Amino acid sequence: MDLIQEIANNKFLLILLEEKEYAKKLQEIMKSSEKTKTKICYVCLSKPYRDVMEDIEKQGFNVNDFFFIDVLSSHYKEQEPVDNCIFVSSPANLAAVRYAIRKAVEEKKCSVILLDTISTLLVYQETSSIVKFTHSILTDEKQENTKKLFIVLKNGAVPGKENKNLVKDLSMFADKTLDFK
Amino acid sequence: MAKKKIMTVDDEENLIELVKAILETEGYEVIAASNGKECLEKLKTDKPDLILLDMMMPGMSGRETCEMIRKNPKTKNLKVAFVTVARFSEVGKDILKKLNAVDYITKPFDNKDLVKRVKKAVG
């Protein structure tokens, strides 16, 4: 599977990963996204952005190519504003996440949105809210020209039927679903 | 002649009322369900000529509800038309085809167009 080609050819990719392959594949996805030579909006739904940034630096990526949205850190402790990240109060606040993504696209000129991992939201929201959230990002005219890469962990925090239903419902909007087995 | 029966399934009460008003004026009998579970429950005793099914509902989605309808031998041949604000990808449209939907109506819809499409679907 040529990821660079897939990212180039599709606007919305749903990427299904196994937990054991997650780190390796995520690195490949970021490498491929980096080749688009644009800023990546990294929406950290599973880890605080500082941890993600540390991982990214260790893997040799230029951290300046990324802008972050962190939904976890503020949930536990109020955060001082920083230049390369927007803190959202809670992962359950999807309206705020959506607004932060729009800001990243408009003000920081991000043209790739990497959502890592959308399946984590099942801990906080029911499937239909996540589907509506995704649809609202996809139909936002301001984000029309961005690439959207949404990662689903196949055996994520809420495995089983709900995860499968989320994948099925999101697949209906995706240009392609990449299932890494 | 018996009136044709339409079931509208939507979590938006206003939309249910609107569909009812439009289709009842045209001589249809309209029954309603506010979610997928209620739709499946009502199908145990009702046999509508057409189901107008919203796609993005809390609980069971329209896709999942339709899959359940197709799985049940008693309901598998019922006509289903999706009514939705969603813009599906080509892949999504293929999934809808596999669910044997007779139509795909986007919200907001034009009242006359809705009537035309319902007439076409129920024959």
Image (cartoon, rainbow, N blue to C red):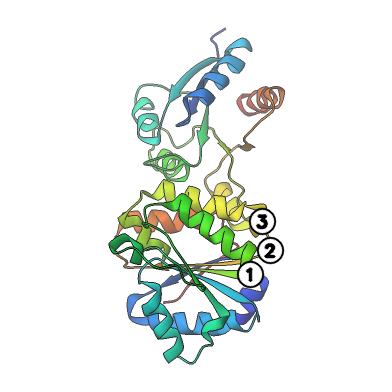
Indicate the chain on which mark 1 is placed.
A
**Nearer to me, A74 or B35:** A74
- Residue A127 coordinates in the image, percent (x, y): 39, 50
Label 1 and label 3 in one chain = yes
Figure check: A32 above or below A143: below
- Which numbered disc, 1 or 3, marks the residue that appears first in the sequence? 1
Q: Which residue is mark 3?
A: A142
Disc 3 and disc 2 in contact, CB within 8 angstroms: no
Question: At numbered mark 3, what does the secondary structure look like: helix, strand or loop?
Answer: helix
Q: Residues within 10 Å of mark 1 (few under 14, many from 20)?
A: many
Q: Please name the residue shown 62% across and 51% down the image.
A: A139
On residue A145, which mark appears?
2
- Residue A63 coordinates in the image, percent (x, y): 51, 84
Residue A44: quarter of image: bottom left
Q: Which residue is mark 1?
A: A111
Can residue A147 be seen here? The reply is: yes
Figure check: B104 above or below A71: above
Figure check: A106 above or below B81: below
**Nearer to me, B39 or A108:** A108
What's under tag 3, amino acid-wise?
Lys
**Nearer to me, A76 or A80:** A80
- Residue A128 coordinates in the image, percent (x, y): 42, 46
User: Going by the picture, which residue comes out furthest to the top?
Assistant: B1
Query: Alpha-carbon distance for marks 3 and 2?
Result: 8 Å
Label 2 and label 1 in one chain = yes
